[in-house]
Amino acid sequence: MDLVAILENTARGLFGEQFIYFALAAIGLNMHYGYTGLLNFGQAVFMAAGAYGLSMAVVTLGLNFWIGLVLGIVVFPLILALIMGVPTLRLRADYLAIVTIASSEMFRIIARSPSLDRWTGSSDGLTAFANDFYDMSPFQAGERYFFGLFIGNQMWVVLVGWILLAIVVTLVWAMMRSPWGRVLRAIREDEDAARSLGKNAYWFKMQALMLGGMFGALGGMLRAIGTQSSQPQNFITDVTFFAWVALILGGVAKIGGPVLGAAILYGVLSFTDIVLRQMVESGIIPNSIMDGTQVGQVRFMLIGIGLVSLAILRPQGVLGTKEEMALDDH
Amino acid sequence: MTTDLSSVLDSVPREPGSAKPDPILKVSNVRRSFGGLVAVDVDHLEVQRGVITALIGPNGAGKTTFFNLLTNFDNPDTGSRTFEGRDLQGIPAHKVANLGMVRTFQLTKSLSRMTVIDNMRLGATRQIGESLSKALLPFTWKRQEAEVTARADELLERFKLSHMREEYAGTLSGGQRKLLEMARALMVQPTMVMLDEPMAGVNPALKQSLLDHVKGLRDQGMTVLFVEHDMDMVQEISDWVVVMAEGRIIAEGPPSSIANNQAVVDAYLGSHHDSALNLEGSE
Amino acid sequence: MLREQTLMSRAGNCIRAGMAIAAVVFLLALPSGPTHAQEGGAEVKGSLTYKDASGEKIAVEGVVFTANDESGSQAGTATSGTDGSWLIQLPPGTYSVELDVSTLPDGVVLKNPDKNPAEVRLVEGNSKSSLFPLVMGSAAPAASEDSGATASESSGDVVETTATVNESSTSGNIRVIQLLVDGLKLGLIIAMCAIGLSLIYGTTGLTNFAHGEAVTFGAVLGYLLNVTGVFGFRIPLIFATVVIVVVCGAFGGAFNKVVWARMRRRGSSLVAALVVSIGFSILFRYVILYFFGGRAKRFRDYQIQEQWDLGWFRLAPKDLALMVVSLVVLIGVASGLQFTRMGKAMRAVSDNRDLAESSGIDVERVIALVWIFGSALAGLGGVLFGVTEAISWEMGFRVLLLMFAGVTLGGLGTAYGALFGSIIVGVFIQLSTLVIPPDMKNVGALLMLVVILLVRPQGLLGRSERIG
């Protein structure tokens, strides 16, 4: 067992790239569910919109990197929110849940379809679209930074991620203490009451869906940049629930909830991951019980267990209080 | 006060669908069915401006459905509704509120996980800071917010809720929630207030103060339409009573005339064999 | 891998069948399908390329492929040409096709090394593509952060690969009729799985996302009994099915008792219940993946059957049996709901729980039975899916989304609506391949779900006041 490697890997989980991607996605979910009461089970598709918006713009259409950013952060998520929201936002909450989860599946089928290969790169996805981003990096490619945790390019992604995270958190904080945020919370509490007081609940819900989706897209785009690839398997349905666990863990409707939750979640996942991997490699766990591929599957089981136990045992998360907002409320 | 207002209605014939001298709300041929069941089938109704009208009827008479149709929370299969001469057909519910008609709900909808003062502030219409583009620019809405808060505090004072200002609305008692909902409705600055069972679940100690508040609305020139089971309340504060049964309006008139109306007695007896018109606590 | 192969062959079939109906040819703007294999023989082939850093496709020449038959002896070999293409002609049967990794150029590796060798089933007159995706680099992506997600890609995709493998282009089958029959078959199975989903929703208000895993569980249990065997004894699928239905029902009942009955007693919110059901769905799915593996597998029984040519369409005996079984079961369920006391009680609870309770119905008992019946039916549906297509760890989740489409179309919470909607969805999926590429046919069904919500959110059989 390599203790240093375990510590390093856990630290990378706590505030590395994965933490940033999913903190952003979870902030989006917080906007949806925590503040507005919308059940979005397809945040992975919004993440994919960010990733594919950028990569398709650059690779497929040959456009400028900056236009790709606009497509990925603004245009694609907005279109997606309209597609998901127009049919469902007038209906009971679980219809949005079904349509969003169905969208995840539609994305998977479309993105992997060989007949659209020249647009999406199908299963292999698209690569090499973020060179402009890395050209701006102040870090040396070969060097290690931040206590030796991140190599040059990685450090650049992480640094930009931290800054974006700080901006987004501030933005959400400011929005939620404005009268606009008050209307969202009123809709979460009781949509009919908000409507009886003259608030266009449908439009406010749509705005929240769009905005939260854009935060998700930002997370997804950063993920695509960080790995220099947009691949369908990075945005499968289950990815959404990593963000959900982060949100519930940290505390629904808390500004810092998703960020703290994502840090804890990825700390725990990275820790178990490396410990299991080392145990498998060193033969402490024999291959007949678990092999390298199966280690990767354990993290999904942990997500499932996390969702179940949080929802039952601590619906208000780490930061939340029962009075203000918990998953368990009526 | 009451005398000259109700004298306006003295000349109005005491029959279903009678015309009023100055109607604020008019309904014609409104029908709503669920599956095969006709819940509401109203030929004609006019509501007089500036008075308190009660809508009563036995359980299942379609009062709440009718109420929803009047406030556009539900759409009729056929028929027309006008408010202040404006056709309500196709107008979304939230716009009806902006036209000056505000409603409350049978089961109070206090926004539990928001503070009392935030509940109140929410009621104000045309808030600049409610547009997303302005939300991030506090200087555009700070002044309006202060005005809204001042008005909210005034109302909280009037409704004796000031001491609960910073509490979550979920911690209020049933009666206090009714008061909060009514006060919040007034933040809209409506011309017409629609109350769906304002007395349901309110403890007797608070009843009188609620009644006074409702009367207060009329004194300030607002029109009130309320659904109620509590006949004491109906007798005490309403200027005009409309009776529904099986989706139809079967009688109209001043409260004194209703108790003796044969159609009304039959309707109530038909649904409650052993209870007469004194409906207090009949539900 | 298996999925991609079948997709390719299916795309080919589309083209060939499309030729028969000149009118639809222009709709199928697909790259040209594989050429016909020799009569009496079959072939496996492929084209070996990878994308370089600039995204350019590069053919790989000189890579050696070997096909071994089931006994392990070599049946054929080929070397990729200048355009990367390779072809091995073989008699019908099941083969394991292996790419010799040592013949790959430096800097290029298999994307999915665990899928080499690949298993290929060849039917007479059939041509199949076997894909070995290549990537640049020295390590497979399985070592990346989300290796679990990578595993999902390796799954055989069940719903998308309806049993068209055996299809051939010989006689004058009418494609529309064939698709209609295929669709009916698919729809009947979806319906069987969806009844439980709809009844659970109706009686408890819960949209149970873990319902798909009951389907997977049924199929995987079938594999365990029929292929792996118990104490070395492999149980014929027909008898195994009886065991599966009982076990799945018992499991559903226990699941309700241990988790859901408690949550109802605690008065948990619907959102918490939704999240819990999703948590279980993910947990079950990955536990199954852990033990069952990422590859799609088949039962021992009813693997390949000669199809009957019935003039307008072709049908394998197993598919006919399957349709008859599902029809009988569904009619049984419908009449049970209509005429038995318990069935009436279930519908009463669905309709109005409070009213049912006050008229003396033991609601919790009804709910428990709904869970047992619903899960048993889902398990049976899983076996039928396994027979007609393949068994994989993700099959239930895929079917779940089609169930959602069917149930929403029919009307959420109505048992007959679920039947009716599911069958329409099945037929719609198959017929949609007339206009959209078959690998995207499920998108059509899911888009239909969205359109229904726009146009008639209460579904075809639902009543308007149930929603909104």
Image (cartoon, rainbow, N blue to C red):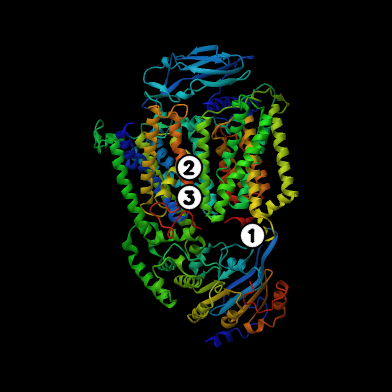
CA–CA distance between discs 3 and 1?
Answer: 26 Å
Image position, residue C330 (x, y; %): 70, 41
For the question of whether residue C189 can be seen, the reply is: no
On residue B33, the disc is none
Q: Residues within 10 Å of mark 3 (few under 14, many from 20)?
A: many
Q: Residues within 10 Å of mark 1 (few under 14, many from 20)?
A: few
CA–CA distance between discs 3 and 2?
Answer: 11 Å
Image position, residue C147 (x, y; %): 43, 32
Asked whether the residues under marks 3 and 2 belong to the same chain, the reply is yes
- Residue carrying label 2: A304
Image quadrant where one finds the N terminus of chain A:
top left
User: As displayed, is residue C63 above or below residue C342?
Assistant: above
Q: Secondary structure at mark 3?
A: helix
Say which residue appears at 64% left-offset and 59% top-offset.
C354
On residue C354, the disc is 1
Image position, residue C347 (x, y; %): 68, 52
Locate residue A58: give its quadrant: top left
